[in-house]
Image (spheres, rainbow, N blue to C red):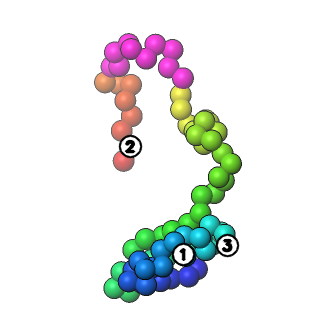
Amino acid sequence: MKRVPKSQFKPRAFEYLRMVQDEGEPLIITDHGRDAVRLEPVADSGANSADTLSGVIEAWERPLDPVDDGSWEAER
């Protein structure tokens, strides 16, 4: 995986964006020698939002009904 410093990325940003898109390889942008940002291509640009969220969203029969405290699950 290629790494470039932020100062080198800035003036050539479009070139790096095109490279990541064409080659499909992620790029790490560093800040003072430390990894700061990972730039990677979209996994499947042909998928639409509905396909991406398939199986993630639940159907609510009555969405305007009040929710009692026991129905919420806290993620930790």
| Secondary structure beneath label 3 | helix
**Mark 3 or 2 closer to N-term?**
3
Q: Amino acid at mark 2?
A: Glu
Q: Are marks 3 and 1 in contact (CB under 8 Å)?
A: no
Q: Is residue 32 left or right of residue 12?
A: left
Binning the other alpha carbons within 10 Å of mark 3 as few (below 14), some (14 to 19) or many (20 upward) gives: few
Residue denoted by label 2:
75
Residue denoted by label 3:
23
**Mark 3 or 1 closer to N-term?**
1
Q: Are marks 2 and 1 in contact (CB under 8 Å)?
A: no
Q: Quadrant of residue 33?
A: bottom left
Q: Residue at x 68, y 48 (%)?
A: 46
| Secondary structure beneath label 2 | loop
Residue 34 appears in view: no
Binning the other alpha carbons within 10 Å of mark 2 as few (below 14), some (14 to 19) or many (20 upward) gives: few
For discs 3 and 2, the disc positioned in front in the rendered view = 3
Residue range highlighted in magenta: 59-68
